[in-house]
Image (cartoon, rainbow, N blue to C red):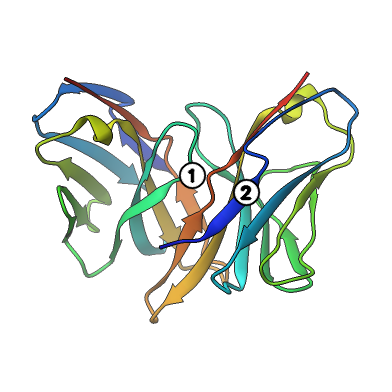
Amino acid sequence: KNQVEQSPQSLIILEGKNCTLQCNYTVSPFSNLRWYKQDTGRGPVSLTIMTFSENTKSNGRYTATLDADTKQSSLHITASQLSDSASYICVVKDRGSTLGRLYFGRGTQLTVWP
Amino acid sequence: EADIYQTPRYLVIGTGKKITLECSQTMGHDKMYWYQQDPGMELHLIHYSYGVNSTEKGDLSSESTVSRIRTEHFPLTLESARPSHTSQYLCASSVQRGSSYNEQFFGPGTRLTVL
């Protein structure tokens, strides 16, 4: 069964600290992996998209890594800011269908305290 | 930057009412999607469209219906709302990026509460 599991479920850190969010997936055949940021009451916004051949991709203070062999990804946030408080969702796309289905994790709820 | 709009943003309505959630995008994307999301849970695809006059049901069974008469417009309708329909509804559209992937852009969502 294709699944995406994220950990931790929630995380509280102090402003200025770094943190790492984890994503494990079983989706196969794999096409790409995305990390989204979803503010409360808003739609998800794309942070990074990585294909099979990409090991790491950065977007400002966000750095995502992908290990396609172990089917794991991480999102590292550097020097956290209050505005980073949000849910971070890992999404994996398969390439087994014309639509290319997306499998969503439940997200990690990050809270940054001043 | 994505230009995808949803109205209303919040809707509280009584059981049995007919409602339509609006979704529009100005990017000319062919593919559009409706997702349902409950608090703390993953997004579930309920409808999608490849283009005008093309609509399909998604993974999650839904009593809602959709239509795609114009490229930019993808409304979702509930003929008779029930409390079990209370949820957040997210609309998205996508564009193909080269041969690697298509990128989805999400609207702000409609939070529906059925009393």
Amino acid type assigned to the residue bearing label 2 in the image? Gln
The numbered mark at residue B6 is: 2
**With B13 as the anchor, is B8 left or right in this view?**
left
Q: Position of residue B68 (x, y in %)?
A: 76, 66
Q: Position of residue B57 (x, y in %)?
A: 73, 55
Amino acid type assigned to the residue bearing label 1 in the image? Gly
**With B115 as the anchor, is A112 left or right in this view?**
left
Residue at the spot of label 1: A43
- What secondary structure is marked by label 2? strand
Name the residue at 22% across, 29% down: A82
Placement of B31 over or under A23, stated as above or below: below
Placement of B98 over or under B55, stated as above or below: below
Name the residue at 54% across, 50% down: B107
**Is disc 1 surrounded by few (<14), some (14 to 19) or many (20+) residues within 10 Å?**
many
Query: Label 1 is found on which chain of the structure?
Result: A
| Nearest to viewer (mark 1 / mark 2) | 2
Query: From mark 1 to mark 2, how far is it between C-alphas?
Result: 10 Å
- What secondary structure is marked by label 1? loop
**Position of the C terminus of chain B by quadrant:** top right
Placement of B103 over or under A60, stated as above or below: below
**Is disc 2 surrounded by few (<14), some (14 to 19) or many (20+) residues within 10 Å?**
many
Name the residue at 30% across, 43% down: A24
Query: Label 2 is found on which chain of the structure?
Result: B
